[in-house]
Amino acid sequence: MILAGGVVETGGKIIKGGEALDAMLEELELVMLEADMGRASIEEVITALRNELVGNRLRKGADLSKVVEASLKRALRTLLSAGYWDFDATVDSLLESGDLPVVIMMVGVNGTGKTTTTAKIAYRLKNKGRKVVLAASDTFRAGAIDQLEIHAERLDIRCISSQRGGDAAAIARDAIEHAKARKMDVVIVDTAGRMQNKLNLMEELRKVHRVTKPHLVLFVGDALAGNDAVEQAKEFQRMLKFDGAVLCKLDTDAKGGAALSIAHATDKPIVLAGVGQEYDDLKQFDPDWLIEEVFT
């Protein structure tokens, strides 16, 4: 953990554990709880912060409470920045490598905005001049197939689909073959997210993953779901390792604790943020913006 500038190696008062420090840490713990950050993540961050501070020296004239808060902000920034990768630059790099089409697999629980996020990513890539194909591999819900087909029509993008109950992996494979034959750039695979039957879901997702060999797997979470979003992320990480997360509804969630907890619980970065209903309301995730929101 990187401590703030008020800590010096020599001279100054030694920071000791005790009531004063405890009170400051409790106050910061409350800030993170109010931001909907998971208790396990908070405890680990606070414990690490306490261990780093106690025994260090405080620069003459420095305010301990400000040093503690600044140190926590740095710790959270480090947490959000760990393993961070740029979505656009990563896709560009994969395209340049020539292994086409680039396959992006979308995973997450139904109702989190996964299908809409799939359309937003397709829009983002199309605007950059990429030729995109969608695969409607959430065959469990007829509504999901219809929804993706409507988005594809609006965006003038091809969507490969079948009737409800079709073979999710076969649809994804057909989309990849379609893209290869027509020299398309990217295939985005929308998958099922029903959590009622985890065993069947896990088998289906693993089969889709095995067949498509995706370059990137993105978990889609709902910022408003708080700790539920964290549990979902951990569940999908157990089922199928993902490379990064997209957090939806960040425009309505000024708290941001779900992002901090997902990054902490899965060791995977938040790479994109959904900030509205329009197709262009998908932004590169900014850790600094989120931390400022938490402490505002």
Image (cartoon, helix red, strand yellow):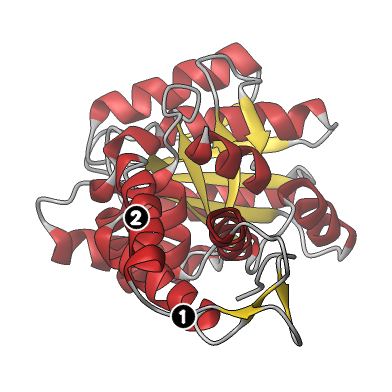
Kindly identify the residue that appears in the image at 34 percent across and 55 percent down: 29
- Residue 261 left/right relative to 213: left
Mark 2 = which residue?
A: 29
- Whether 176 is drawn above or below 40: the answer is above
Kindly identify the residue that appears in the image at 60 percent across and 19 percent down: 279
Mark 1 = which residue?
A: 16
- Report if the CB atoms under discs 2 and 1 are less than 8 Å apart: no
Give amino acid for label 1: Lys
Circle 1 crowding by C-alpha within 10 Å: few under 14, some 14–19, many from 20: some
Which residue is more in the foreground, 110 or 206? 110
x and y percent of residue 11 in the render?
75, 84
Kindly identify the residue that appears in the image at 48 percent across and 64 percent down: 242
- Whether 155 is drawn above or below 76: the answer is above
x and y percent of residue 33 in the render?
30, 48
Q: Secondary structure at mark 2?
A: helix
Which residue is more in the foreground, 181 or 94? 94
Residue at the left extreme, as displayed: 196
